[in-house]
Amino acid sequence: MAGRVRIGVDIGGTFTDIVAVDGTLGKYTILKVPSTPTNYVLGIKTGLERLFSEHGWRPSDVALCFHGTTVATNTVIEKKGAKTGLLTTVGFRDVLEVGRTERPPLDLYNLAMERPKPLVPRRLRLGVPERINHRGEVVEPLDTEAVREAIDRMLAMDIEALAISFLNAYANPVHERRAREIARSLRPDLYVAVSSEVNPQFKEFERTSTTVLSSYVGPRVSRYMEGMKTVLAELGVKSPLHIMQASGGAMTVDAVAERAVHTVLSGPAAGVLGALKVGEAVNEPNFVSFDMGGTSTDVSLVKNGQFRIVEETKGVGYHLRMPMMDITTIGAGGGSIAWIDTGGVLKVGPNSAGAEPGPACYGMGRNVTVTDAHVLLGYIDPGFFLGGEMRLDTKRAHTLIQQKVAVPLGLSVEKAAAGIVRIANANMIRAIKRVSIERGHDVRDFSLIPFGGAGGLHAGQLLGELGMRRVIVPIYPGVLSACGLVEANLEYQCVQTILKRLDGVDASTLRGLYAGLEIRGRKEMHHIRDGALRFKRAANLRYRKQVRQVTVELGSEWADHTTIRRQFREAHERLYGYATDEPVEIVDIRVACIHPPPEGVDWGKAAGDGADPQKGRRRAYFEELDGFVDCPVYARGNLGRDFSVQGPAIVEQDETNTVVRPGQTLTVHPSGNLFISPGP
């Protein structure tokens, strides 16, 4: 593969982070530029142009380009997707509204609960005669004339995308493929998603919901990807573009075009990969990754060096089924807006000031944000924001906090700012408890790895309030998600539903089914030489008559029936507290086709020489000390390997700051990462 540089581009609500790793020189280069919400591609182009001009790289030096995007997620949340039609088996047009009888835990007794409206209104959901049974046998042929009439009706209502989900299509896709041919013959540019390719698994509601989501976001994601390809072509970058998936692997742009839904919830996944790299560097296998950016905070728990993969989620308000990291996202970031509700209670988020107009201290925003509070409390130097590239307006932040928060609540400006930070912390504590305590983990057994532009500003307080082991601040905390992108595997997931008793499928048949999925994966990843691919097998199993299944990771080596059954029993007992000798059913099998990245550059770097690490002092507000104190400020790059300091203290670097609370101790780990230990 030509080129030596791998580039990761991660778009946030406020900033776009770019990381380049040069495999020849063995170094990382980081860059942070403002996001351009009206057209995110423009910010990416500006950043890449700077990267090339400032570091002397040529476009031909780029080997791979990875991108984490929030386009699909935001499309669903903001309800800005394509006008979508649904073609399904006659009698099943209402499956989206019938759904499941489950209720969200917080709405279990809420008589006024309203379910989200389907993304496809009923007039655009049409059924056609056809029938395939669960064994894949055609019971009733597809009525092709009815298909043409139904699609014509939807086209007359100006649909922009079409989802096709027929009954039992996971067992035989022939009718769905024929319907797609007809749709494209009627309108070649129509975006079409078929369930047998998007989510070829049983359960009609889940499969249909996921396919509809893929069609709903597909046109917007496709346009965005075309924009990215155009930018790279204009810059002269000929290397392939890969997009992060929610599962933690990257896929090609061509694969995104067919399965756009796999980019939903993909942005936060790269951050977890970056945190894993940090955990490896300091030999910490148990931690909570804490990614606080400008718009949101994403938290995920890693135990024994492994993140949890879930098969289903309602993280965007609609049922989505595909492999994805278990990540909890809340609307709490540096740009989260502080406001007072009708009852006179101070709230923070979930709305954000974004990059335009941004926080008040950026000079144009009219809303008070968490970042404004940090500036006022002395945690951020207004003259050294982004390493001095951007000067902040402290006076404007002071005036708006006073007008919008302090005066209405009868507080001093300082106490109002501290209250904003405290409420943001409370929101984040709930998110961390959700992925740890509520799932049976003792949060005191875990470290906290904060990153994102604001993670280090809050981590010390969270450490004290949650009683966690320690805080580990990465070398590049402000751009860790982009760092994770360049460390991602190239990955393609293949799945096939079985729905048989495990002891009813002989070993040779099962081996053949897995081999078939591997062949499919090789075809999809044809651009990778065969010897460079590796495969991870998994199976979803359950006791007969159960609704939920348990995922069992089988690894790359062949596992016999006895091993599979034992692993299932162990996993079931671990999750539910019991296991029985009841017959086990194999629901579906999965193969992940993986191409790992080249040996990464060591993120660790020699600590500074320790010469004059303190760059000055600044007044900063600490509630533990009842007000402002004269606080030492240190330059991160100058901290020696034996450096240690007792809080309060502030450590500055170009893209973020770390606040050490009173009583806490900061030390430099040999890897270059920072440790913050709790006070007595």
Image (cartoon, helix red, strand yellow):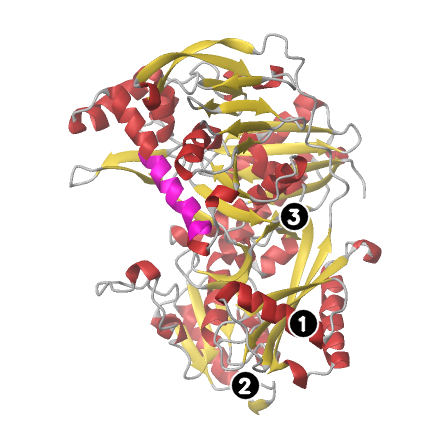
- For the C terminus, the quadrant is top left
- Please say if 79 is above or below 522: above
Mark 3 or mark 1, earlier in chain:
3
Residue visible at 84% across and 56% down in the picture: 531
- The x, y position of residue 317, in whole percent, is 39, 58
Instruction: Specify few, some or many for label 1: CA neighbours under 10 Å numbering under 14, 14-19, or 20 or more.
Output: many
Q: Mark 2 to mark 1: distance in Å?
A: 39 Å
Mark 3 or mark 2, earlier in chain:
2
In which quarter of the view is residue 229 placed? top right
Residue beneath label 1, please? 564
- Please say if 387 is above or below 205: above
In which quarter of the view is residue 537 placed? bottom right
- The x, y position of residue 206, in whole percent, is 47, 70
Mark 2 or mark 1, earlier in chain:
2
Residue beneath label 3, please? 242
In which quarter of the view is residue 119 placed? bottom left
- The x, y position of residue 564, in whole percent, is 67, 72
Tag 1's secondary structure? helix
Residue 142 has which mark?
2
Residue visible at 30% across and 25% down in the picture: 417
Residue 92 or residue 626, whichever sits in front: 626
Residue 585 or residue 11, whichever sits in front: 585
**What type is the residue that disc 3 sits on?**
His
Task: Look at the magenta stretch and give its main secondary structure.
Answer: helix
**What type is the residue that disc 1 sits on?**
Ile
Q: Look at discs 3 and 1 and give the one toward the viewer.
A: 1
Q: Is residue 222 left or right of residue 206?
A: right
